[in-house]
Image: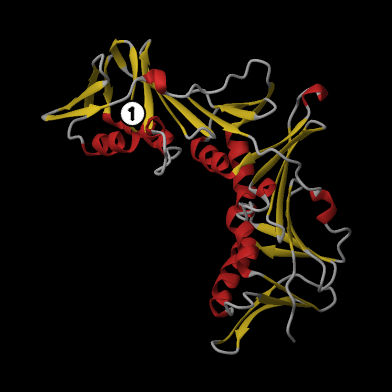
Amino acid sequence: MKFTISKESLQQAIQQVQHVVSARTTLAILSNVLLRAKNGVLELTTTDLDVGVTCSVAADVEEEGATTLPARRLATIVRELPAENIEISVDEKNVASIRSGPSYFKVLGLTSEEFPALPRFDDAREFRIDQQILRDCLKKTSYAISTDETRYVLNGILFSFKNNTLTMVATDGRRLAMVEQELEFPQSQEVDIIVPTKAVNELARLLGDLGEVIIRVTNSQVGFDLGDGLLISKLIDGNYPNYRQVIPGEAKERIALEREVFLKAISRVSLLASEKSNSVKFQFTPGQVEIIASSPDIGEARETIAINYKGASITIAFNPEFTMAPLRNLSADEVHLHLIDEISPGVLRTGTNFLYVLMPMRVNS
């Protein structure tokens, strides 16, 4: 195998695939990246047996072939190479010679036959969505994924394809983020799947602003085809809890808030929230909201924001980090906080397709 490629192209391609490689793996081959050169294209693939990523990049291929090389070491070498072009040749013993300007490296690889084959998607359900839309949906939900491994079905995002709508949900039991996106597909394709956190993070990294992504689903796997990149992941096996039942009913108060102003105020006040209670109080009175954090051993912080509110006085406390998370990840200038009373969950909404349910905390008067 022999090819020449620009340093920038190879570096970007390695960056796209190397995050999947586990630092602690018992199988040596899983520390390697599979390189396959043919038809003017270099294809790079990595896998940890749960998630696999493939990236294709243009190269000047002199001799076709395949090998595997240590992923992290290759990334480090490529990053430090002095010239713009890199020539890589691999002999029949999987020894790679890497040349760039005055630099020369010899790296020992393993045969491509040892590399685990990625699953095929011959009889899969298929959905198409713009990359930018999917990336936006991930951004609006992924921060609410649970990290508690005992509730493994919550360690990912639910993708529910129903009634020509893709509904994506993430929850950790104390908050829930949900986004809905219209999508055309036949009723026979309807399915619910849970995509694990690692795949969600990789997908968010791979998605761009242009083009569409083809989502292929089988009983145990999902594939996201981005044209020059492919992500494949095992699905989380299990039933996602009924998220609709935690969404509160009709709100008594709908409060319009400037997202950026609200976010910065909470951020400042929460500096004095006590580590034990980790809560911030919101006192809504006509024309204003006062945000308060106090802790007996540190002190107190207060900030008042003028708002267009004419309802009854209401005081409710939330975890500040959980309150700020959606505000950081939304782009709308204005959000609406829906409240029923001081002990019911609050709901943050923007537009018609996003909502965020937040459990209140006990208020100490």
The colour scheme applied to this rendered structure is secondary structure
The answer to whether 136 is drawn above or below residue 332 in the figure is: above
Residue 93 vs residue 114: left or right? left
Residue 258 vs residue 9: left or right? right
Residue at point 56%, 22% (across, down): 119
Residue 303 vs residue 63: left or right? right
The answer to whether 299 is drawn above or below residue 243 in the figure is: below
Q: Quadrant of the N terminus?
A: top left
Residue at point 73%, 84% (across, down): 364
Which is more toward the observer, 136 or 262? Answer: 136
Q: Position of residue 237 (x, y in %)?
A: 69, 38
The answer to whether 195 is drawn above or below residue 36 in the figure is: below
Q: Quadrant of the C terminus?
A: bottom right
Residue 306, by quadrant, is bottom right
Q: Position of residue 362 (x, y in %)?
A: 75, 77
Residue 340, by quadrant, is bottom right
Residue at point 23%, 25% (across, down): 86
**Helix, strand or loop status at disc 1:** helix
Residue of label 1 = 9
Instruction: Please state which amino acid type lies under the numbered disc 1.
Output: Ser
Q: Position of residue 337 (x, y in %)?
A: 75, 63
Residue 212 vs residue 89: left or right? right
